[in-house]
Amino acid sequence: MRPSKNAAAPETAPRGFFASAVHAGIKKNRSAPDLTLIYSEAPRTSAAAVFTTNRVIAAPVRLSRQHLHASHGRARAVVVNSGNANACTGRAGWDCALRTASATAQILGIRLEQVLVASTGVIGVPLRARFITSQLVALKQHLSPAGMKDAAWAIMTTDTFPKLCSRATTLNGTKVRVAGIAKGSGMIHPRMATMLAFIMTDAAVEPADLQRMLKAAVKESFNRISVDGDTSTNDTVIALASGSAGVAVKSGTPAGTRLQTELTALCHALAQMIVRDGEGAKKLVTIEVRGALTAGDADRIARAVANSPLVKTALAGSDPNWGRILCAAGYSGARFDPDKVDIRLNSLFLCRDGANTRFNEAAARRELDHDQLTLRLDLHQGRASARFWTCDLTREYITINASYRT
Amino acid sequence: MRPSKNAAAPETAPRGFFASAVHAGIKKNRSAPDLTLIYSEAPRTSAAAVFTTNRVIAAPVRLSRQHLHASHGRARAVVVNSGNANACTGRAGWDCALRTASATAQILGIRLEQVLVASTGVIGVPLRARFITSQLVALKQHLSPAGMKDAAWAIMTTDTFPKLCSRATTLNGTKVRVAGIAKGSGMIHPRMATMLAFIMTDAAVEPADLQRMLKAAVKESFNRISVDGDTSTNDTVIALASGSAGVAVKSGTPAGTRLQTELTALCHALAQMIVRDGEGAKKLVTIEVRGALTAGDADRIARAVANSPLVKTALAGSDPNWGRILCAAGYSGARFDPDKVDIRLNSLFLCRDGANTRFNEAAARRELDHDQLTLRLDLHQGRASARFWTCDLTREYITINASYRT
């Protein structure tokens, strides 16, 4: 278990938010919390969300999308369970999500469409609503501003540590807080993954602005990480803005830009925690591409290198096999001249002008033994660049995933 | 070591072809052959080839492409080494490939552009031409019609068994033979991989027709398999037609259609051997998609399922996790209604109308424990279908690839 480095400190917890968690019997392990409720006391809390791009969409994602639309971007509660994704569960799965939201609305005294739901875990196994609905009164009773850490534990599946982060800044003379929790850790891929994240701020932001800001933040963070290249049916990032700090923030203003920066940094920190905790991963690897002709080319190369099983297994074995990196760039679809490419491991040149530099093998292995490293590709073709984060592919990934359901 | 099921029997060896193999010192293991020469005695032997689509192209691939062009599709010798891919080796790598071809032409008394070369192995390490050129006289001396099996051994890298196949048919009253050798076994992916295959026939086929037939055969075989989703810098499939059987075959004639069928069946058998011998693989898995709206949709789904690390690890663990299969279909980009999908493991329904069938878990595990199985997706959207072959992703894949260079 690696500790979370960014546990939400009380002074940076956004005002107006409460959370609690319980073990509801969805996970087999009775000591593991598997159900959490996040609640905002402000009646006009804004909500925004980014969901999976998979065509197979879990029931909770469909219901949350419908509620966000019906409420015009206002939501006050999020109910999340782990241990069962409620995906590919047919009509019964939809009914389960609806009953969960409906019971939550009744117990909290809010409108149905103000409740969002999310699930993560095994696909294709029926989820019984009663497991969840029977715990809602207890969850309401235990709601607390300090409950976010429990919530971070309750949304974990194969994660080995809870992921929390919080930040604070001063906007128009008033302190504003941004915090979030997230879970990985398989099926992590650009354009979302089995990845849940719940972001809160006590700034007042109109729903359309919040949606715009969230989308921009996700693009630079959760959409630039890769664990295994699979995209899940349940991906959800929800942002809530309570307004409890008493500062209204609009997109396009200096305060809006500041809030965007905080939001992006928060998502970025959570995304890095997800990669660091990738299934079986031991290393956090940054892929930096520069000198590309276009941003699209830079992006394609960074993604291809980040997703290559051969690159990722070489990283696991501390093998400075730069040929696989260049090879992945080659099949990415990007335009470049292989004979001009430089590849560096941190600052050590492995390849210059597309060929071996006769680098010091022992030195390269020492760099690769660290748990954080950067692979830098310079194409010398233009000025575009891109960054991406990935992890090594280890035997533990196979062990974890070969018998996930049992 | 699993035995090759289709060793080329003497009576089906195409007439006019000779081969030999030696250990040239490129591989560290002295008992492993790493260099082979394939030779056709017929002066007008036709040649065709399909090469990697990677933008990073190894020197031997560039040279062979140039020679095929210069000779208008006539070639009489192929020199292949394993242990070093001669890729990302700059100007020196090109010179090495050229010196190899040049020395071969001189020793065999044929024109330079009649020599094709291929390499497979580690990327980015200089390959010394002298290792190869010093062995050419010995290779010529040992040329034999029975040498094809030695050639199949000499092109292996992490393959665990040599891959040979031969077939015979009667065209216009005369027996015609088709045979081939191939190697895998990592970086295997649709649109070619570190995959070499050399196909021979003693039918007389004009170069343009041979190219057309080879392309069609590759599309249905080597381009429909996946081991790990990486595409190599060195992929090469070469076909040679000696004409020694004394039958001329043209595309579009009944005999041409028959030869095409034989060629496709041969490539298909070799492709299946490659998947069966995928790095660390224990199972050969056929993905069958039917009921798609378009052939493109069927193809996208079959590829996505075949490439999903989560599907492949579940197969390794005999876990009937059909949710991952449906999930991969969902992110493939194909259009379909998830609520109409049926998924079968061999004939056992795991999922009907997108939801669990409450299948017998023990029975499903027994089916998954076999080393050959079929996953069938029926979309119930239209009439298009596609097939693909993949293998399971095991911990041995990681072990093999984490320290390939050492």
Image (cartoon, coloured by chain):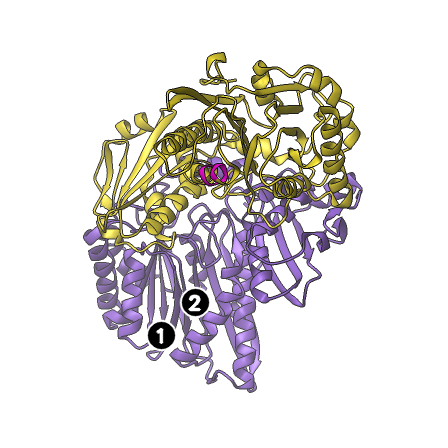
Chain colours: A yellow, B purple
Label 1 environment density (alpha carbons within 10 Å; few <14, some 14–19, many ≥20): some
Residue A386, which numbered label? none
Q: Amino acid at mark 2?
A: Pro
For the question of whether residue A89 can be seen, the reply is yes
In the displayed structure image, the side of residue A293 where residue B34 appears, left or right: right
What segment is highlighted magenta in the picture?
A209-213
In the displayed structure image, the side of residue A35 where residue A47 appears, left or right: left
Between discs 1 and 2, the one toward the N terminus: 1
Tell me the residue at 52%/17% (across/down): A1
> How far from the left and from the top, in percent, is residue A140?
70, 19
Residue B41, which numbered label? 1
- Whether the magenta-drawn stretch holds residue A212 is answered as yes
Residue B145, which numbered label? 2
Residue A174 appears in which quarter of the rendering? top left
In the displayed structure image, the side of residue B275 where residue B380 appears, left or right: right
- Whether the magenta-drawn stretch holds residue B138 is answered as no
Image height check: is A335 above or below B257?
above
> How far from the left and from the top, in percent, is residue A298?
33, 47
Kindly state the secondary structure of the residue where label 1 is placed.
loop
